[in-house]
Amino acid sequence: MAPIHVLHGQPTPEELATVLAVVSARAAAAQAAAEAARTGAGPASPWNDHARRLRVAPRPGVNAWRTSGWAG
């Protein structure tokens, strides 16, 4: 990862640690997603996830009888 420089302000060590943790987590997630897309280990995006097409079962409550007949 490239070095990070503080351009404005005087962040506390806690604030700087928080920013670095978030940036590191985002970089790791992006790298894992790129690796999964490259190897075909899983969907590269939620649009390619076939599990999202599964029908959600109706929940008990108001109008549950009506929604139970809807096509998925």
Image (cartoon, grey):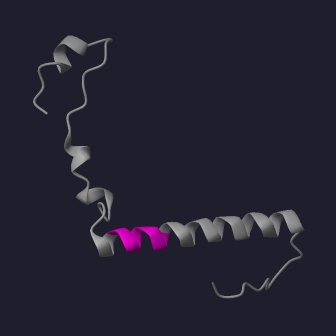
Q: Quadrant of the N terminus?
A: bottom right
In the rendered view, tell whether residue 65 sits above or below residue 16. above
Residue drawn at 72 percent across, 84 percent down: 4
- Seen in the image, is 66 located left or right of residue 62? left
Residue drawn at 21 percent across, 50 percent down: 50
- Seen in the image, is 42 located left or right of residue 14? left
**Image coordinates for residue 18, horizontal then vertical, percent:** 75, 63
**Image coordinates for residue 41, horizontal then vertical, percent:** 30, 64
Q: Quadrant of the C terminus?
A: top left
Residue drawn at 19 percent across, 20 percent down: 67
Q: Which residues are magenta?
A: 30-36
Where, by quadrant of the figure, is residue 2 drawn?
bottom right
In the rendered view, tell whether residue 50 sits above or below residue 18. above
Residue in the foreground of this view, choosing between 41 and 23: 41
In the rendered view, tell whether residue 60 sits above or below residue 44. above
Where, by quadrant of the figure, is residue 55 drawn?
top left
Where, by quadrant of the figure, is residue 48 drawn?
bottom left
- Seen in the image, is 28 located left or right of residue 12? left
Q: How many marks?
A: 0
**Image coordinates for residue 25, horizontal then vertical, percent:** 60, 65
> What predominant SS class does the magenta segment belong to?
helix
Residue drawn at 10 percent across, 30 percent down: 71
In the rendered view, tell whether residue 27 sits above or below residue 2. above
- Seen in the image, is 53 located left or right of residue 6? left
Specify whether residue 32 is painted magenta. Answer: yes
